[in-house]
Image (tube, rainbow, N blue to C red):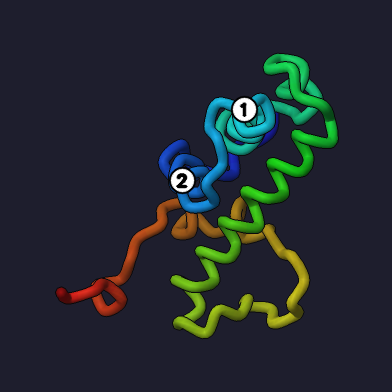
């Protein structure tokens, strides 16, 4: 079993924002991988998803998470810390403060 990369609430928000159907085998398998820490092959077998659909769903969710994180935690510049433009998800495991998406008071709308 792998270390989970997202909380259930984070995964649910990503599903909602990306308009994924939470009831599809690929989305269910991505949840098992990213929230429960299950291996991709086992998750796919458990819900009846192909290896490629599990990979695509996991990658898509992590890309969405990274985009959201960069928007909120990079000072609003939208650029990654390393500035390489390449996908870097190492911060999902190593930086605990990124496991909870908190909107800073200064960034909240005042309607």
Q: Quadrant of residue 54?
A: top right
71 vs 59, left or right, is: left
SS label for mark 2: helix
Identify the residue under disc 2.
Answer: 16
Identify the residue under disc 1.
Answer: 24
- Mark 1 or 2, nearer chain start: 2
Residue 91 percent coordinates (x, y) = 62, 60
43 or 94: which is nearer to us? 43
Dot 2 crowding, Cα within 10 Å, few <14, some 14–19, many 20+: few
32 or 26: which is nearer to us? 26
Could you tell me which residue is drawn at 71 percent across and 23 percent down? Answer: 43
**Relative vertical location of residue 78 with respect to residue 9 in this rendering, above or below:** below
Residue 26 percent coordinates (x, y) = 68, 31
Could you tell me which residue is drawn at 60 percent across and 54 percent down? Answer: 92
Residue 74 percent coordinates (x, y) = 51, 78
SS label for mark 1: loop
């Amino acid at each position: 079993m792998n270390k989970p990369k997202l909380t259930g609430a984070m995964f649910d928000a990503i599903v909602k924002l990306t308009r994924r159907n939470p009831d599809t085998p690929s989305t269910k398998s991505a949840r098992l991988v990213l929230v429960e820490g299950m291996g991709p092959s086992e998750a796919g077998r458990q819900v009846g998803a192909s290896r490629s659909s599990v990979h695509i769903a996991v990658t898509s969710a992590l890309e969405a998470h990274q985009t959201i994180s960069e928007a909120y935690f990079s000072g609003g510049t939208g650029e990654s810390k390393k500035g390489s433009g390449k996908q870097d998800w190492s911060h999902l495991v190593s930086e605990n403060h990124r496991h909870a998406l908190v909107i800073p008071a200064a960034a909240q709308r005042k309607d």
